[in-house]
């Protein structure tokens, strides 16, 4: 099945490597055998193949992996060795992070002398900025199209991400891995220094240090092609094996006043929606620290939700407030498009016409002299009644920012909305709404959708020498700044929901502090440990969560990825109540005799450590939060070539590995192979001879035996 996906021009020299190495081991003896042992690389992130309606992007190796002699490329001048002069192609390039640019990759793509790339982190991150996404993210799937607002489509007027190289959307026919551990990188470099350094520009001597990157991909061409293959497999194969899976996960949403999940809301009920996104990406699989692009707004919205839930009159506000976190938004708005679709189909408790207004937080951590920008949609505002409602929202925002360190400013009314989930709602219906960001036009985020959008890029850093527990509670300037934004958001939502102007709403900067630590630095902290749902405790890690949306096989429910499970646990803790349920009641509330159980979700959480620090005291938390399947409607509709909905799928693969080892010279290899073949032929001959003479060779003894009787 996967044959069509295999790389055409494989490297013949390496084909026989496995065989010859084994034979070589047999030929040579003692210490030389030892030196041919593989060292596997344990901390790498691969680039994998993704597909949409029309294209394939990402990377793949040939079926058994690609191998090449390692060459370290740290400066422009080193490129000529691998591209032109080096005598031992193909090369595996160990690429310095600052050279990981579109220009370099295009040179590698055109060269037949490159078998793969292992990228090192640039330290510090490139100061001029680095983004792997497109200059115009999510183009074509928002509200501006060639039909609707063509003057704003294709980022005409405002290019949001000018630093974007678009590398994440290129197709590569060789493997590219990121080396995530400096010590491992050092092991490779040492092997290179010991064996491969060209002396005075002459060829280094064998054996040479080589690397093998293995990441063959099953799916090819496009989602249309791979989905067709999937369905053929499903109908005709006894052992169906899909070749690609849709990108999918869960949206998370909750309301201030509980909503009956099995009914639909009355038409007169109104909801103020507050939205943020829940995912990010980079070039590499499952690598997306997404600090500014996602975590800044995620944490801010969580803090606002906590503050509003604490208000005494939150349950009696004239309008309800819904907090939504959308999944898969970087892949053409998977989560928001699914929610809008379900709202239109009446499969969601809230309908589109229940939405009173919409406030979305986009990137908010990098405010310049405290300014927060208000973006609105010029097209829907041309309707006077809607424009009036938007003006009211802006007025509410401005009164909410009194006495805070946030200065609200409107961008010009002729500017389009930046990429935002709100665009998917506007696509379906004109709703008054605003998008709040720290940028007026182009992103202030210099590392949008790259591996450098880390805690440090939004100034979340800690004095050295702090223990984990101290760092968890260490209030950074960023925590302070995001708390201010959260205060403005909470006050605005409260006002829009009909609460009285001037109410005292306090955002807890300690919550923001702990969330920033958990969502950006280390999920395995004492707070997350005590609030995580018991069966998700395996998601906690001593490193930052990654916000890449997961893939799910058709028709199966995805499992929440780690950041989603953290979000659910935190949201439940901040907005829920502890209830006196046993574990059984909590996990299947139908058994509990609660008349209001349709209104809530229950979470059985690990609980805090006991006094003696050995056992935990688990408990049950009741909250209004829900998760909502975020898979593109294109897959439910079987419209794999949809232009309306996201069509992104991820190829399946059998294995992904990387390793280094020493290779003997080409000549030696050939000799080994020839010897091997000779040995093989001799043994074939011997077998044939023995077989053909078997009668003579064996019957005589048998006869002898028989004669003994
Ligand atoms: C699929 O992705 C490619 C590469 O980014 C893009 O050029 C193309 O327009 C996309 N196709 C659709 C239907 O969105
Ligand atoms: C790398 O090596 C240094 C010194 O040998 C050690 O202190 C450090 O913990 C190692 N780092 C990792 C990530 O293993
Ligand atoms: C990866 O792990 C294996 C097994 O634990 C170990 O032998 C190998 O040395 C590690 N690789 C590196 C580069 O440290
Ligand atoms: C490399 O060149 C330098 C100076 O030209 C010379 O001293 C040295 O011996 C050369 N090394 C080798 C291995 O040829
Ligand atoms: C982040 O910190 C650096 C140095 O401490 C400072 O120059 C910069 O202005 C800060 N950025 C923000 C957005 O606070
Ligand atoms: C403006 O929008 C309202 C609903 O928001 C609609 O009833 C009205 O017809 C629209 N007016 C025009 C001129 O389109
Ligand atoms: C999480 O932290 C605890 C200590 O707080 C430690 O015992 C445990 O091994 C850590 N888990 C992981 C997966 O690192
Ligand atoms: C939330 O977490 C804190 C700290 O672990 C705990 O004291 C509190 O009871 C929790 N609240 C809920 C509703 O789970
Ligand atoms: C919780 O439930 C237990 C057993 O059902 C009961 O004994 C206890 O009084 C309850 N506590 C509260 C606070 O309702
Ligand atoms: C929720 O809605 C269902 C179906 O409409 C209804 O049977 C149930 O009583 C409602 N629950 C509550 C608590 O209102
Ligand atoms: C720790 O305390 C819990 C209850 O507080 C008790 O059940 C458990 O036996 C204690 N464990 C030890 C090792 O003392």
Image (tube, helix red, strand yellow):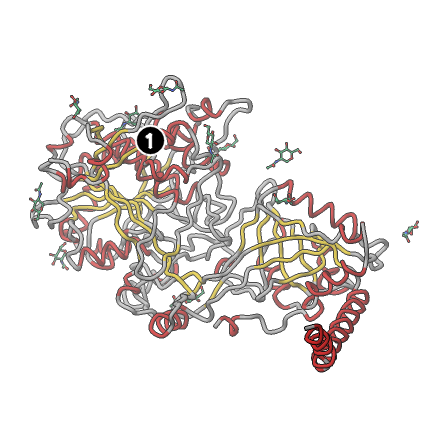
Q: Is residue 11 left or right of residue 243?
A: right
**Residue positioned 70% across, 54% down in the render:** 76
**Residue positioned 17% across, 58% down in the render:** 344
Residue 683: quarter of image = bottom right
Badge 1 element: loop
Quadrant occupied by the C terminus = bottom right
Q: Residue furthest front?
A: 709
Q: Which residue is mark 1?
A: 606
Number of other residues with Cα within 10 Å of mark 1, as a class: few under 14, some 14 to 19, many 20 or more = many
Ligand 1 position by quadrant: bottom left
Between 297 and 347, the one lying in front of the other is 347
Position of residue 556 measured from the top left corner of the image (x, y, whole percent) = 31, 57
Residue 15: quarter of image = bottom right
Position of residue 393 measured from the top left corner of the image (x, y, whole percent) = 21, 42
Position of residue 276 measured from the top left corner of the image (x, y, whole percent) = 31, 44
Between 278 and 45, the one lying in front of the other is 45
**Residue positioned 49% across, 38% down in the render:** 457
Q: Is residue 467 above or below residue 7?
A: above
Q: Is residue 702 above or below residue 507?
A: below
Q: Is residue 68 left or right of residue 383?
A: right
Residue 370: quarter of image = top left
Q: Is residue 621 left or right of residue 130?
A: left
């Amino acid at each position: 099945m996967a044959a069509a996906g295999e790389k055409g021009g494989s490297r013949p020299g390496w084909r026989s490597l496995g065989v010859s190495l084994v034979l070589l081991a047999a030929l040579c003896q003692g210490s030389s055998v030892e030196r041919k042992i593989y060292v596997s690389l344990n901390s790498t992130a691969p680039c994998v193949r993704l597909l949409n309606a029309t294209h394939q992007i990402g990377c793949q190796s040939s079926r058994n992996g690609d191998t090449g002699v390692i060459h370290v490329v740290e400066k422009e001048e080193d490129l000529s060795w691998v591209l032109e002069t080096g005598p031992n192609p193909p090369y595996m390039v160990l690429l310095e992070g600052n050279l990981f640019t579109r220009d370099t990759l295009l040179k590698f793509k055109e060269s037949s002398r490159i078998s793969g790339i292992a990228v090192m982190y640039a330290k510090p991150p490139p100061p001029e900025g680095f983004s792997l996404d497109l200059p115009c993210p999510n183009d074509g799937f928002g509200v501006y199209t060639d039909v609707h607002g063509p003057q704003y489509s294709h980022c005409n007027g405002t290019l949001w991400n000018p630093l974007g190289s678009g590398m994440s959307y290129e197709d590569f026919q060789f493997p590219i891995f990121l080396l995530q551990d400096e010590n491992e990188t050092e092991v490779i470099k040492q092997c290179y220094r010991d064996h491969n350094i060209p002396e005075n520009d002459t060829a280094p001597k064998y054996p040479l240090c080589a690397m093998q990157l293995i990441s063959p991909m099953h799916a090819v061409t496009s989602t249309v092609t791979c989905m067709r293959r999937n369905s053929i497999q499903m109908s005709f194969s006894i052992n169906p094996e899909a070749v690609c899976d849709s990108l999918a996960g869960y949206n998370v949403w909750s309301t201030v006043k509980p909503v009956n999940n099995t009914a639909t809301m009355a038409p007169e009920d109104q909801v103020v929606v507050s939205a943020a996104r829940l995912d990010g990406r980079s070039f590499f699989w499952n690598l997306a620290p997404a600090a500014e692009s996602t975590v800044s707004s995620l944490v801010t919205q969580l803090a606002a939700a906590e503050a509003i839930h604490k208000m005494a009159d939150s349950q009696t506000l004239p309008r309800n407030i819904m907090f939504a976190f959308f999944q898969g938004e970087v892949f053409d708005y998977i989560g928001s498009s699914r929610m809008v679709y379900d709202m239109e189909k009446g499969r969601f408790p809230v309908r589109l016409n229940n939405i009173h207004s919409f406030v979305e937080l986009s990137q908010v951590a990098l405010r310049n002299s405290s300014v927060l920008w208000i973006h609105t949609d010029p097209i829907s505002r041309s309707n006077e009644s809607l424009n009036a409602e938007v003006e009211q929202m802006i007025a509410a925002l401005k009164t909410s920012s009194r006495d805070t360190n946030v200065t609200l400013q409107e961008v010009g009314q002729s500017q389009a909305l930046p990429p935002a989930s709100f665009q998917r709602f506007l696509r379906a219906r004109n709703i008054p709404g605003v998008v709040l960001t720290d940028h007026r036009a182009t992103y202030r985020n210099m590392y949008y959708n790259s591996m450098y959008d880390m805690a440090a890029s939004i100034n979340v850093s800690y004095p050295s020498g702090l223990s984990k527990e101290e760092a968890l509670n260490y209030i950074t300037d960023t925590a302070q700044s995001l708390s201010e934004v959260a205060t403005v958001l909470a006050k605005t939502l409260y006002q829009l929901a009909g609460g009285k102007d001037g109410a005292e709403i306090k955002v807890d900067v300690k919550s923001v502090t702990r969330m920033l630590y958990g969502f950006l630095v280390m999920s395995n902290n004492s707070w997350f440990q005590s609030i995580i749902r018991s069966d998700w405790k395996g998601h906690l890690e001593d490193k930052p969560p990654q916000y890449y949306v997961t893939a799910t096989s058709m028709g199966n429910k995805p499992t929440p990825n780690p950041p989603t499970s953290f979000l659910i646990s935190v949201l439940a803790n901040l907005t829920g109540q502890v209830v006196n349920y046993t574990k059984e009641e909590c996990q299947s509330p139908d058994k509990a005799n609660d008349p209001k159980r349709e209104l809530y979700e229950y979470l059985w959480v690990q609980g805090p450590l006991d006094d003696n620090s050995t056992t935990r005291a688990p408990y049950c938390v009741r909250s209004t939060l829900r998760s909502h399947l975020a898979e593109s409607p294109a897959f439910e509709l079987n419209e794999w070539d949809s232009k309306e909905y996201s069509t992104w799928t991820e190829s399946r693969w059998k294995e992904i590995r990387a390793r280094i080892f020493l290779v003997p010279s080409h000549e030696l290899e050939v000799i080994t192979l020839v010897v091997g073949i000779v040995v093989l032929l001799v043994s074939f001959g011997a077998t044939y001879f023995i077989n053909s003479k078997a009668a003579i060779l064996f019957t005589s003894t048998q006869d002898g035996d028989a004669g003994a009787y």
